[in-house]
Image (cartoon, rainbow, N blue to C red):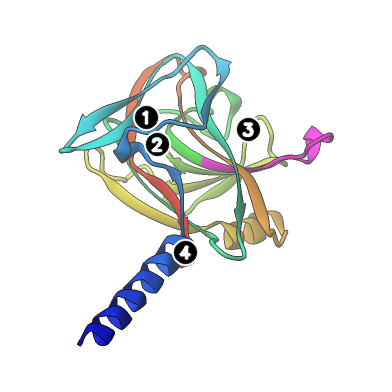
Amino acid sequence: MIKQILQLVTVIAISSNALAADRLPIGQFSSGDLAGWEQKSFSGTTVYNIVSDSGRKVLKATSNSSASGLVKKIKVDLNKTPVLNWSWKIDTQLKGLNEQSKAGDDYAARIYVIIDGGLFPWNSKAMNYVWSSNQARGATWGNAFLPKNAKMMAVKGQKGPVGAWQYEKRNVKEDFRKLYGKDLSKIDAVAVMTDTDNSKRKMTAAYGDIFFTEQ
């Protein structure tokens, strides 16, 4: 009996280690952890802090005519864990914007992954998963300021439900192949941003934990 119990414990331990290896945490907001996240400001400062929402800790973003994000530099092997998982919620839509124009390049919520161009910044690439206020879900386009270096994808569109948590997952490797025509093996950073600097509005959003998985 003791031998069987030890064998069972070993199997459970191996299974747990396999699950841990298949899940790469990026943003552990539910633990109140912001370690490794750095503020990057483009125009003004969006306020990010950990708050309690529906009994769990989340990252709250408040933008008031501002555009700044939180960036975490971390290399992710897309051959092992290509699928990005996250949850998010917005309180309202940024209606009336043309997000494909520079004047309307604002988003209630976005999560994006980055390839660092190193000594050649023009080689940097970004995939932006956005909650769009005027595009249909699934729409893609080049960013109004950097159309060749930043691709936008409306994971949630203008009909997306507001005031309720939404859970998402995207295969980053497949999306880069589709929009850039490149077969990537890794990314260098993940960022979150809520921005309203162009529209001069106020927006509040929240983000749950962010992590990569095999499937």
Residue sticking out furthest to the right: 119
Amino acid at circle 2: Ser
Q: Can residue 156 be seen in this view?
A: no
Instruction: Judge the density around disc 1: few (<14), some (14-19), many (≥20) Cα neighbours within 10 Å.
Output: few
> What residue appears at the point 22 percent right and 42 percent down from the top-left corner?
164
Which residue range is magenta in the image? 112-126
Q: Does the magenta stretch include residue 119?
A: yes
- Return the x and y of residue 172 as percentages of the image width and height: 56, 56
Q: What element carries label 4?
A: helix
Q: Is mark 3 on a helix, strand or loop?
A: loop
Label 4 belongs to which residue?
A: 22
Between the C-alphas of marks 3 and 2, the distance is: 15 Å
Between the C-alphas of marks 2 and 1, the distance is: 6 Å
Above or below, comparing residue 206 to residue 166 in the picture: above
Q: What is the number of the mark on residue 95? A: 1
> What residue appears at the point 69 percent right and 54 percent down from the top-left corner?
180
Above or below, comparing residue 71 to residue 153 in the picture: above
Q: Is residue 79 left or right of residue 192?
A: right
Between the C-alphas of marks 4 and 3, the distance is: 36 Å
Label 2 belongs to which residue?
A: 133
* Disc number lying in front (4 or 3): 4
Upstream in sequence: badge 3 or badge 2: 2
Q: In this view, does 180 lie to the left or right of 166?
A: right
